Structures are given as structure tokens and as C-alpha cells.
Amino acid sequence: MAATIRTLCCSVLRNHSRQFSTTCGVQGGEKWRKEHGLARSGTEYGPLTDLPDWSFADGRPAPPLKGQLRRQQGREDLARRVVMLSTEMDRGVEVWKEKEEEAKRMEEHRKSLLLKPKGKLLLKKKSQS
């Protein structure tokens, strides 16, 4: 049964005039653009996508297109997220520093509570210092 289906599919593909490809489509120049710090394609950002397509004859700008508004909103959302994550990181670093300082204080307090050397041990400790 499986051999019959395979034979049928192979014969259909062999007799079909169009080519069948399983490779992924890659845009030309993508590697070069990435190496030079540009977008993967020419339509992701830049003057061709960010600027209006036309303007009124008297010089007034055209109303923004839906795609431009969507990209602007996405950039604003990203900027808000970056600010939020940055403030969270700053707060986290401050909390970490406070915990480290508290741990140092506790260690110093613990050392201060230890028994002090007396007699001959005190003299030995002073002479080593």
C-alpha cells in the first residue's frame, strides 16, 4: 500500500512541469546587511518604511498609514519595556548591595561577640600584629 502511494507521488512529481524545492527562502544580501549593522531586509526600517509616501501639494504632511502607526506603537511599547526593565535592574542591584552590606554587618557583629583572648594569648596576638 505504502509503496503504491510512493510510486504514485513520485510519478506525479516527475511528470509535473514545476520544480519542487524544500530549501528555505533567503533574501539576497541579508548576510551583508547584518555584517554592516543594517536590518535583515530593506523594508524593516528606514526612510522607505518610516517616511510618508506622499504629501499634499500645499506642503502639509500626509496622514500616517496604518503600518506606520503600528510600527510607531511597537517602538513605543519597546521603549517602555526597556525603561521598565532598566529600573527593575537598578532596584535589583540596590537590593543586592543592601543585602551584601547587611551580611558584612552581621559578620562583624558575630566576630565582635566572640570571646577575646586573655593573658598569654593576648600578648602573642599583639606581637604578631
Image (tube, rainbow, N blue to C red):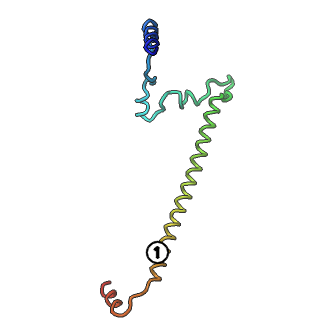
Using the image, determine if residue 86 lies above or below residue 1. Answer: below
- The residue depicted at 42 percent of the width and 8 percent of the height is 14
Q: Secondary structure at mark 1?
A: helix
The single residue placed furthest to the front in the displayed view is 1
- The residue depicted at 44 percent of the width and 35 percent of the height is 37
- The residue depicted at 56 percent of the width and 47 percent of the height is 82
- The residue depicted at 30 percent of the width and 84 percent of the height is 128
The location of residue 7, given as percent across then percent down, is 43, 11
Horizontally, residue 129 falls left or right of residue 23, namely: left
Horizontally, residue 119 falls left or right of residue 86, namely: left
Using the image, determine if residue 22 lies above or below residue 69. Answer: above
Q: Amino acid at mark 1?
A: Glu
The quadrant in which the C terminus is found is bottom left
The location of residue 86, given as percent across then percent down, is 55, 52
Using the image, determine if residue 65 lies above or below residue 122. Answer: above
- Identify residue for label 1: 107
